[in-house]
Image: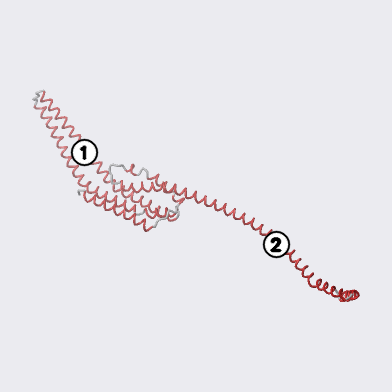
């Protein structure tokens, strides 16, 4: 409203009297003071509602997008967890088979002392067990693979060493068995001649030539028995002590191999999240190993040298 319009309004109100002037003043004040403020607030309110509507739409969009992300993360996590469980299941299967192979390999070392078991029988599982242990290289961690490799290398080295030394004992054992067979055969011949002499006596046979020939054969076989007995004694004089020493060596190697097991066990337990204090486990393991050594040493001390 400009100055001219104001003057015209005052003039009009003046013609209407004082009351009209006052009323016009109030109206003017209302129009000038309240209406612009109302219109301004009204415009603000409209803008705020429009802004809130837009913000709400944005929030809903973000919520939907965030929900999709959460679902993708959840799905990925489930897949990862399933993958981890599958991996653990495979590892458990491999390690259970490997534990049996480790035990067989460990026992194989001490089995070499028994000369009645052929080498082929003792080592028959070696190739198969090596294949089982090789699976660890696929599923195992660096620590497990390293510990297993050290163990299997020691098994191979000690097996060859013991088999080489064992071959001498096996050959001597075969020689003893052969001489014992010859001795037994000579004894059978003597028994046969004694039976013949009994029959001659029953027949009242007094033929000097026959009796002389029989006695000569008996004496001959008796000399062979004495010779074989002496040979067997000489062979056992060497075989006995050497076999005891070899048995001791087998057990020493067994305990050395056993001492390589804890790194494997601890590494596997760590992979499978089967926690145990390494110090506690080593205390238990070494205590049992020491007891095993003590029992074996006490046993050998009782064996006549």
Q: Nearer the viewer, mark 1 or mark 2?
A: 2
Q: Residue at x 17, y 40 (%)?
A: 229
Q: Quadrant of residue 277?
A: bottom left
Tag 1 near tag 2, CB within 8 Å: no
Which residue occupies the foreground of this view, 45 or 205?
45
In this view, 130 is above or below 225: below
Q: Give the CA separation, mark 1 to mark 2.
A: 110 Å
- In the image, is 292 to the left or to the right of 235? right
Q: Quadrant of residue 31?
A: bottom right
Q: Which residue is drawn at 59% across and 55% down?
A: 70
Which residue occupies the foreground of this view, 206 or 46?
46
The residue wearing badge 1 is 180
Q: Where is residue 216 in the image (x, y as percent from the top left)?
A: 12, 32
- In the image, is 85 to the left or to the right of 257? right
Which residue occupies the foreground of this view, 25 or 166?
25
Neighbour tally class for label 1: few under 14, some 14-19, many 20 plus, Cα within 10 Å: some
The circle drawn on residue 151 is: none
Q: Earlier in the sequence, mark 1 or mark 2?
A: 2
Which type of secondary structure does the marked residue at label 2 adopt? helix
- In the image, is 112 to the left or to the right of 53? left
The residue wearing badge 2 is 52
Q: Where is residue 295 in the image (x, y as percent from the top left)?
A: 26, 51
Q: In which quarter of the image is the N terminus?
A: bottom right
Q: Where is residue 86 in the image (x, y as percent from the top left)?
A: 50, 48
């Amino acid at each position: 409203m400009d100055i001219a319009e104001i003057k015209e309004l005052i003039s009009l109100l003046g013609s209407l009297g004082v009351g009209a002037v006052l009323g016009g003043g109030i109206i003017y004040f209302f129009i000038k003071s309240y209406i612009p403020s109302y219109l301004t607030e009204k415009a603000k309110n409209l803008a705020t509602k429009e802004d809130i509507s837009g913000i709400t739409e944005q929030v809903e969009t973000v919520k939907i997008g965030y929900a999709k992300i959460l679902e993708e993360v959840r799905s990925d996590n489930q897949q990862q967890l399933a993958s981890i469980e599958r991996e653990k299941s495979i590892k458990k299967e491999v390690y259970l088979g490997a534990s049996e192979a480790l035990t067989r390999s460990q026992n194989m070392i001490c089995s070499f002392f028994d000369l009645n078991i052929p080498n082929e029988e003792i080592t028959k599982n070696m190739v198969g067990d090596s294949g089982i242990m090789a699976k660890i290289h696929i599923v195992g961690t660096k620590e497990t693979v390293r510990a297993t490799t050290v163990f299997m290398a020691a098994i191979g080295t000690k097996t060859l060493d013991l088999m080489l030394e064992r071959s001498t004992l096996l050959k001597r054992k075969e020689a003893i068995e052969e001489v014992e067979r010859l001795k037994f055969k000579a004894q059978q011949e003597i028994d046969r001649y004694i039976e013949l002499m009994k029959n001659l006596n029953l027949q009242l046979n007094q033929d000097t030539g026959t009796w002389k020939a029989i006695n000569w054969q008996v004496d001959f076989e008796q000399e062979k028995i004495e010779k074989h007995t002496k040979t067997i004694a000489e062979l056992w004089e060497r075989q006995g002590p050497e076999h005891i020493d070899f048995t001791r060596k087998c057990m020493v190697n067994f305990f050395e191999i056993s001492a390589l097991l804890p790194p494997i066990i601890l590494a596997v337990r760590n992979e499978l999240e089967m926690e145990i204090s390494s110090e506690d486990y080593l205390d238990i393991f070494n205590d049992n190993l020491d007891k095993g050594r003590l029992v074996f040493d006490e046993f050998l001390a009782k064996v006549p040298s």
